[in-house]
Amino acid sequence: MGGVTRSVYLTEKRLIDSGVSVRVVDYGRVRSALGALTMLTIAPATVSVVNVSGLRRFATLARLGLRAGKVSILFLHGGQIPAEYCEMSGRRRRTVKRLLRRADMVWCTNDSLAVFVRSRGAERVELVSPMPSAPSRSASAPSRSAGHPRRSGDAAVFAYLGAPLYGVEVAVEAVRGLREDPRPLLTKLHVVFYGGASADTERLARMLAPIDWVEVHRDLRPEEVATLLSSVAILLRPSQTDGDAMLVREALALGTRVIASSCVPRPAGVEICEPTADALSDAVRSGRTISDGSGLGVPADVALLNALAISSDKRR
């Protein structure tokens, strides 16, 4: 999303501590990304990993990314990817399938994405989590909550392109109901749209404008995402589908309570519920069901070290 950095930061540190040289290219900055990837196609890395949170700009970036490493990996972690694919023209669908087949490996954050890419011709598919197994002792990310105390009555919800599947309206209704409690646990909701403008974003923005306890944010910078997650009491994720949402991982790493839908496996410590307003508000009040972290993929650093070993074997 161009805003979640902790998973990349910790994975990079873990690899560096293992003696691996790492270069990170921010796909959120399209011009600089294209320039960096073009240079890497001239002198390819040992392994290139293209993180895919959505299919917008996918063809251009993936085409270059697949040429940027001797072993190329597409890492799909956006739960909305199958829906975006269904809305594409036939020509663009063929491009996606061709790139999935061209990659040496396709990593997915859950089984539903893995089934989707296998049915489109991808052969080597693995389940991988975007977070590393454990940060090294020296890899403590800079504190990004200093000067921003946590506000006990605030919650946040994020939506890529304002898509309905992220449950913004569910979160709004849940907080509306909680505000009516004698001692409300939540009184304000931050709604964050990212990925640029869309019809859904504009529709929701118009709907939310008259509500004085809702604050709308658009396309926050990485440090702004971290500050917001550090300052709210709860991250709400009532999504209808998902990847291994990096926002969830980021919030957990910053010590923020997370309540998410049970549509996919969730990291340990996440409170889970059905993606309805009543279930979400009940979870805020009680927090009864907590994920044990089962059903998630191999940690990113382990998967990358395995890919490096495969690349080494290829050169022998």
Image: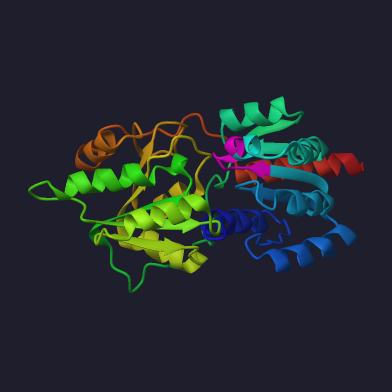
Q: Classify residue 299 as left or right of residue 233.
A: right
137 magenta-colored: no
Q: Which residues are magenta?
A: 75-83
| Number of callouts | 0
Q: Classify residue 61 as left or right of residue 314.
A: left
Percent from the top left, x then y, of residue 195?
55, 56
82 magenta-colored: yes
Q: Classify residue 271 as left or right of residue 102.
A: left
Q: Residue furthest bottom?
A: 147
Q: Classify residue 33 as left or right of residue 81.
A: right
* Residue 160 in view of the camera: no
Vertical placement of residue 268 versus 70, above or below: above
Residue sitting at 59 percent across and 42 percent down?
77
* Residue 110 in view of the camera: yes
Vertical placement of residue 13 versus 240, above or below: below
Q: Residue furthest right?
A: 316
Residue sitting at 50 percent across and 29 percent down?
295
> Toward which corner of the image does residue 29 lie, by quadrant?
bottom right
